[in-house]
Amino acid sequence: MARTPGRADPAAAFAQAVQSGDWPAADRALGALLRADPGNPALLYNHGLVLRRLGRLADAVAAHDDALARAPEHANAMFERASCLLELGRPGEAEAGFSAYLAHRPDDADARLNRARARLRLGRPDDAVADLDGLDDTDSAVRLARAEALRDLRRLDEAAQVAQGFG
């Protein structure tokens, strides 16, 4: 992208904004980059990340959809899209998204935990427990999800044992 004299390089402005956590500035810089290269899947993916940080979850899903339309195997876009869907309260779509991601990265503990959370919201605690099996139970998020799943399965003694240590 050719720079106009006196104007900052948008890629440098984006990097600086991300480093400083200035998400509105990152969004503006990405806007300039996307105007120059609107179909770039990496830029679209990063736009989705920034939009999520700005709390614009539906727009973030759309940006990740655009990235995936151009690069269907973009695993990070799959993960982030599914995460946004889970935050939006769309557990069925989130579960499908995490399943697609896990087909590429089956050992990703965060994706397994998030799919378990989606499955809990869908009323499928057995499937949630299956996702949680083998994850690090010293992680409080894993323990909480496991306790919720066991509670939903009416395995209350096990749920209470797993939940020990929560305030």
Image (cartoon, rainbow, N blue to C red):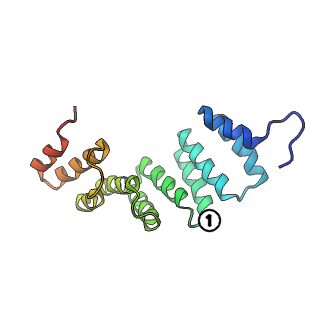
Quick check: 111 left or right of 163? Answer: right
Q: Amino acid at mark 1?
A: Ala
Mark 1: which secondary structure? loop
Quick check: 116 left or right of 25? Answer: left
Quadrant of the drawing holding the C terminus: top left
The quadrant where residue 139 appears: top left
The quadrant where residue 17 appears: top right
Label 1 Cα neighbours within 10 Å, binned few <14 / some 14-19 / many ≥20? some
Q: Is residue 47 above or below residue 71?
A: above
Q: Is residue 51 above or below residue 81?
A: above
Provide residue 143's location: percent of width, then percent of height: 25, 46
Asked if residue 22 can be seen in this view, the reply is: no
Q: Identify which residue is drawn at 28% across, 56% down.
A: 132
Provide residue 67's location: percent of width, then percent of height: 62, 59
Quick check: 112 left or right of 128? Answer: right
Residue located beneath label 1 in the image: 71
The quadrant where residue 165 appears: top left
Asked if residue 121 can be seen in this view, the reply is: yes
